Image: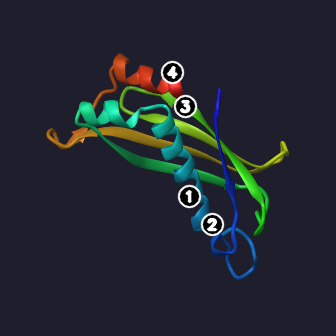
Amino acid sequence: MAFIKTIKIRGYHCDSYGHLNNARYLELFEEARWSLLEEANIIQPLKEHGLLFFIVNINVNYRRAVDDGFTIEIHTQTDEIKRKTISFKQTMYEKGSDTVLSDAIVTFVLFDPDQGKAITIDPELQELFVTHG
């Protein structure tokens, strides 16, 4: 099941054409991911393990123009868990519609600063993302 974050698009999010600026999509997707991590209490267990959360790849598809005044919903869910990476699938909709405005796959690693590298994601850590993402 996806976590849903609702956000109102404001004038400062938009470019000179009145559309949501392409860089802002990344910020809005990030806001939705952090909201999920906070609400699902994933951040604290990562801190307890001494781990950082690093994005290593983002692929965004811009499907429809998003204008000032839109209220959007971003649905975020765990997409794929591999040995060293986890990815989230994020889909942006206009609130109350099933029309996809944008979608993204965001891949990240869990980084151990003491080792200076990404770690292998053990079953305990995987469970945080399977249960809540």
Q: Which residue is mark 1?
A: 26
Dot in front, 4 or 3:
4
Q: Which residue is mark 2?
A: 22
Q: Is 49 on the left-hand or right-hand side of 104?
A: left
Q: Which residue is mark 3?
A: 78
Q: Amino acid at mark 4?
A: Thr
Q: Are marks 3 and 1 in contact (CB under 8 Å)?
A: no
Label 2: few (<14), some (14–19) or many (≥20) C-alpha neighbours in 10 Å: some
Q: Are marks 2 and 1 in contact (CB under 8 Å)?
A: yes
Residue at image point 61% right, 53% down: 60
Q: Is 94 on the left-hand or right-hand side of 127?
A: right
Q: CA distance from mark 3 to mark 1?
A: 17 Å
Q: Which residue is mark 4?
A: 131
Q: Earlier in the sequence, mark 4 or mark 1?
A: 1
SS class, disc 2? helix
Residue at image point 47% right, 49% down: 57
SS class, disc 4? helix
Q: Amino acid at mark 3?
A: Thr
Task: Please identify the quarter of the rendering in which residue 67 is found.
Answer: bottom right
Q: Is residue 3 above or below residue 28?
A: above
Residue at image point 70% right, 63% down: 9
Q: Earlier in the sequence, mark 3 or mark 1?
A: 1
Q: CA distance from mark 4 to mark 3?
A: 9 Å
Q: Amino acid at mark 1?
A: Leu
SS class, disc 3? strand
